[in-house]
Image (spheres, grey):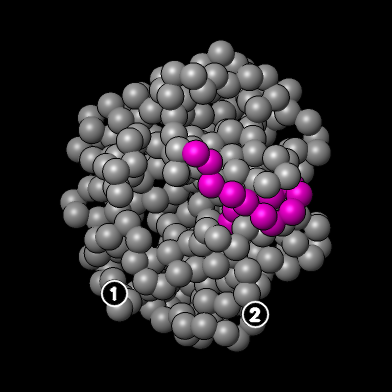
């Protein structure tokens, strides 16, 4: 069943996503070579709780951490630990969830650490741009398939990257994962018709190589089969009659990266707010 949200519920979702966004900004300010996944996860959990929230991922289906931390060929659901040490040239996808006032915030960002190759930076930029193409397609009267088509057309057809099929976006609200599923591939005019009050997480997961992924021995981490890098960006959004209201805010992250000397290459900020 799909739960369409009231204006009041959308504002509660925005508050949860604001904490998510600021948590990701904290991570962006900390990242540097030699740091571990466990360090950023501990800092993120403390920050979330200090701001009145609860980590949305920790304990979800027994997931052991507050963040999903997935470097390089890891696509999503990487488990941060002391052995996971970031190196110069790594990219690190960080997915964060927060429960606040009974609603879930959910957003993700892929960070480049140090001297990342231009080839990999192109993957990040194209994936980031595809997120906003998907968001632009999520307007009243369109269908869910239009979102996936916009993302797939830009990343797979125009840039020859691989769009992951096994993992998709989703509805978000009182539950972290609600109906409908929001694939990053699809056909125009197919799927659920988009109506005001729909709240969804749009999250392209795009591989530099082929689309194929596999699960690691830990049962959580998805990696690319060809072991080429993968990028992941995510916003939670609400559909309004006047457009798409982006509830999470990557501008906090961009501001944090401006001050981090170890992030030597950055993405160009995309338009926030209402599309």
Residue 88 location, quadrant:
top right
Q: Secondary structure at mark 2?
A: loop
Q: Which one is nearer the viewer's eye here, 232 or 263?
A: 232
Check if residue 71 falls in the magenta segment: no
User: Quick check: can you spot residue 102?
Assistant: yes
Residue 151 is situated, as x and y percent measured from the top left of the image, at 65, 64
Q: What residue is drawn where x is 46% and y is 75%?
A: 242
Q: What residue is drawn where x is 59% and y is 16%?
A: 33
Q: What residue is drawn where x is 34% and y is 66%?
A: 178
Residue 67 location, quadrant:
top left
How packed is label 1: few (under 14 Cα within 10 Å), some, or many (20 or more)? some
Residue 23 is situated, as x and y percent measured from the top left of the image, at 39, 35
Residue 270 is situated, as x and y percent measured from the top left of the image, at 61, 50
Q: What residue is drawn where x is 43% and y is 24%?
A: 81
Give the magenta range.
204-217
Residue 148 location, quadrant:
bottom right
Q: Which one is nearer the viewer's eye here, 38 or 136?
A: 38
Residue 269 is situated, as x and y percent measured from the top left of the image, at 62, 44
Q: Which mark is residue 3?
A: 1
Q: Kindly identify which residue carries mark 2.
A: 187
Task: Say whether residue 67 is left or right of residue 49.
Answer: right
Q: Which one is nearer the viewer's eye here, 54 or 77?
A: 77
Sequence-wise, the earlier of marks 2 and 1 is 1
Q: Image height check: is 31 above or below 135?
A: above
């Amino acid at each position: 069943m799909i739960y369409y949200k009231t204006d009041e519920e959308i504002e509660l979702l925005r508050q949860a996503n604001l904490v998510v966004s600021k948590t990701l900004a904290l991570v962006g300010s900390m990242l540097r070579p030699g740091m571990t996944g466990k360090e950023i996860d501990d800092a993120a959990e403390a920050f979330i709780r200090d701001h009145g929230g609860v980590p949305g991922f920790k304990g979800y289906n027994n997931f052991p951490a507050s963040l999903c931390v997935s470097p390089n060929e890891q696509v999503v659901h990487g488990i941060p630990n002391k052995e996971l040490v970031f190196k110069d040239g790594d990219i690190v996808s960080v997915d964060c969830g927060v429960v606040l006032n009974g609603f879930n915030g959910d957003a993700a960002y892929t960070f480049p650490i140090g001297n990342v190759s231009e080839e990999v930076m192109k993957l990040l930029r194209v994936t980031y741009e595809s997120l906003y193409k998907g968001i632009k397609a999520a307007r009243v009267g369109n269908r869910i398939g239009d979102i996936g088509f916009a993302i797939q057309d830009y990343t797979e057809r125009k840039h020859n990257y691989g769009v992951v099929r096994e993992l998709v976006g989703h509805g978000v609200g009182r539950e972290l994962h609600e109906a409908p599923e929001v694939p990053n591939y699809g056909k125009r005019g197919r799927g659920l018709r988009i109506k005001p009050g729909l709240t969804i997480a749009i999250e392209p997961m795009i591989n530099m190589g082929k689309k194929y992924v596999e699960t690691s021995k830990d049962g959580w981490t998805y990696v690319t089969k060809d072991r080429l890098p993968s990028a992941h960006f995510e916003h939670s959004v609400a559909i309004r009659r006047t457009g798409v209201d982006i509830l999470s805010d990557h501008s906090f992250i961009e501001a944090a990266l401006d001050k981090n000397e170890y992030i030597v290459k950055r993405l160009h900020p995309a338009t926030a707010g209402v599309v």
